[in-house]
């Protein structure tokens, strides 16, 4: 597959439009095509993946700055940072060997973006015609011309073809 730092494509939308659902459908499609895919979820409100009372939580509570839990099948690391890591740093440090990194969010990271839009959830997309910035494509439940390729929200194979051609050409 690809060497070096993998391309990053951000899945963006207003709240509740279906970013996670799109990623859940897109990953298996890309994996079936032979691509190794990683993801980064952006949470501007902070998060906690450790559970109160568990050993790793207890380690963190008593002052460990980095806590890792490892098994034969996976590893997870919780690390304090002085400030939010830049997306490029996260990808370079943790996603070597991937062909593609999909992000959920990172609207302002300057990466190519695919917006998810559903008429039932919002009056209009994030982007407007002529003001598309980093927008590479639109996944929507009805055709909207923003000057970028449009795909129906259920047409995962077409989006997969677009991503493979545009970002994963070998």
Image (spheres, rainbow, N blue to C red):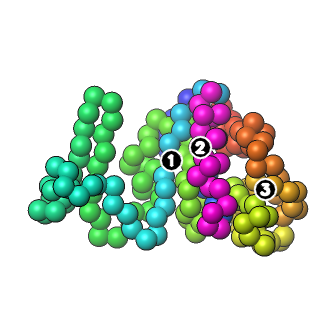
Q: Which residue is mark 1?
A: 39
- Do callouts 1 and 3 mark residues in contact (Cβ within 8 Å)? no
Tag 2–tag 1 contact (CB < 8 Å): no
Q: N-terminal of the two: label 1 or label 3?
A: 1
Q: Is residue 30 placed above or below 10 in the rendered structure?
A: above
Mark 2 / mark 1, whichever is N-terminal: 2
Q: Position of residue 77 (x, y in %)?
A: 29, 49
Q: Which residues are magenta?
A: 14-32
Identify the residue shown where x is 33% and y is 55%. Answer: 49
Q: Residue 132 location in percent, x, y?
A: 76, 67
Q: Quadrant of residue 78?
A: bottom left
Q: Residues within 10 Å of mark 3 (few under 14, many from 20)?
A: many
Q: In x, y percent, where is residue 93?
A: 38, 48
Whether 58 is among the magenta residues is no
Q: Image point 26% across, 33% down: which residue?
A: 71
Number of on-image labels: 3
Residue 140 is marked as: 3
């Amino acid at each position: 597959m690809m060497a070096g730092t993998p391309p990053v494509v951000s899945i963006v939308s207003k709240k509740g439009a279906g970013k996670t659902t799109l990623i859940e459908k897109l990953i298996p499609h890309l994996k079936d095509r032979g691509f190794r895919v990683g993801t980064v979820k952006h949470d501007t409100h902070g998060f906690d993946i450790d559970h109160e009372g568990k050993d790793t939580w207890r380690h963190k509570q008593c002052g460990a700055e980095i806590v890792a839990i490892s098994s034969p099948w996976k590893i997870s690391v919780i690390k304090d940072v002085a400030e939010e890591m830049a997306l490029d740093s996260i990808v370079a440090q943790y996603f070597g060997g991937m062909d593609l990194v999909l992000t959920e969010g990172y609207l302002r990271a300057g990466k190519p973006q695919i917006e998810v839009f559903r008429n039932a959830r919002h009056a209009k997309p994030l982007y407007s015609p002529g003001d598309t910035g980093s927008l590479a494509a639109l996944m929507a439940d009805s055709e909207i011309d923003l000057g970028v390729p449009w795909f129906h929200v259920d047409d995962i194979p077409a989006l997969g073809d677009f991503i493979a051609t545009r970002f994963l050409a070998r």
